[in-house]
Amino acid sequence: MASKSDLIVSFGEMLIDFVPTVSGVSLAEAPGFLKAPGGAPANVAIAVTKLGGKSAFVGKLGDDEFGRMLAGILKDNGVGIDGIKFDQGARTALAFVTLRADGEREFMFYRNPSADMLLTADELNLKLIKSAKVFHYGSISLIVEPCRSAHLKAMEVAKEAGALLSYDPNLRLPLWPSAKEAREKIMSIWEKADVIKVSDNELEFLTGKEVSDEAALSLRHPNLKLLLVTLGEKGCSYYTKDFHGKIPGFHVKTIDTTGAGDSFIGALLCKLVRDDSILKDEAKLKEVLKFACACGAITTTKKGAIPALPVESEVQALLKS
């Protein structure tokens, strides 16, 4: 693995989020919408490059104005786009997202089917995937075929080539046929991952238990190197074979939580790809997770995911303060 460049390859969906021009209203009440590039795996890829790391994105976009725009945004942010395919028959996915007055996010998706769902195993850029030192993915690409098979093949190829597998399920229940199927499919690839990040809500959903060390430890598997549970403004908990603990969060003025988890995992992977001894050294891991929590916090202080992802100097300023 020493000969590999420090490349993080992110696999999955990229889409356009439409966010209301006014916050604290339902989608039906919103007077207008602004378009914001999104999609968790793409956010992670950009989070990495903004912190000075090296990343590439693998996925499918519509051969339309929005698809070309999204590919351009990745490229402008230094993300490798050799893994992107364009579909002439399907549109780029759209999502309408609002933050209601009660602080909960409301989603409405337009994918019938969208281009990202139609990526096939034959369309994968295997050379790119094999060159990854870290291969990162979510669970939305597991919902339907042919993308599910492409996802499984990409994971297998990355693993065989010696990549560290990083999994953030990024649960979006409205996209799944049922909660039962979401749980089953998310867990179907659980034991393959080396690093897993879940939110507090996802921990409750997957285990049926309240957030606790016991609930988190029930998700461990023998080959898992690191399990992370993000706790919003309260920071995160971490679990390895040898130690576990908690990192407090940062107090910031939160405007929009979109992309905070992607910023967090992107920051962690950026550090991990350069020094994998972090996974065995608790002091080092705590430093890195403090950095990752700072990245997540900064991302909540601005609207939209990608425009809010921080650069190193912003993170250091928050850490010093």
Image (cartoon, rainbow, N blue to C red):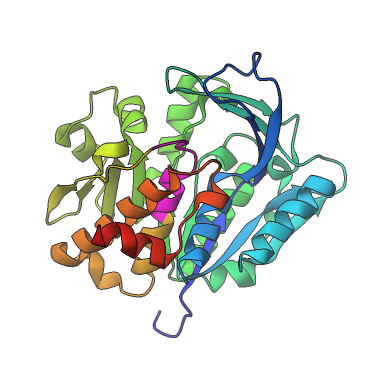
Residue 69, how many percent across, how many down? 76, 53
Q: Which residue is at a point 56% across and 38% down the rendered structure image? A: 140
Vertical order, 5 against 120 (above or below): below
Residue 169 image-quadrant placement: top left
The quadrant in which the N terminus is found is: bottom left
Report how many numbered discs are placed on residues in the image.
0
Q: Point out residue 172 in the picture as x, y percentages from the top left corner.
A: 51, 30
Where residue 250 appears, x then y in whole percent?
Answer: 27, 46
Span highlighted in magenta in the image: 254-265
Q: Is residue 84 left or right of residue 309?
A: right
Q: Quadrant of the C terminus?
A: bottom left
- Let me know if residue 193 appears in the view: no
Vertical comparison of 269 with 88: above or below: below
Looking at the image, residue 202 sits to the left or right of residue 126; the answer is left
Front position in the image: 262 or 123? 262
Using the image as rendered, state which of residue 244 and residue 44 is in the foreground: 44
Q: Spot the residue most to the right.
A: 88
On the picture, is 191 further left or further right than 303?
left
Q: Does any portion of residue 219 appear in the rendered image?
A: yes
Q: Residue at x 20, y 45 (%)?
A: 248
Residue 259 highlighted magenta (yes or no): yes
| Relative image position of residue 185 (x, y in whole percent) | 48, 34
Residue drawn at x 69%, y 40% as measured from the top left? 117
Closer-to-camera residue (250/239): 250
Relative to 90, say whether 1 is above or below.
Answer: below
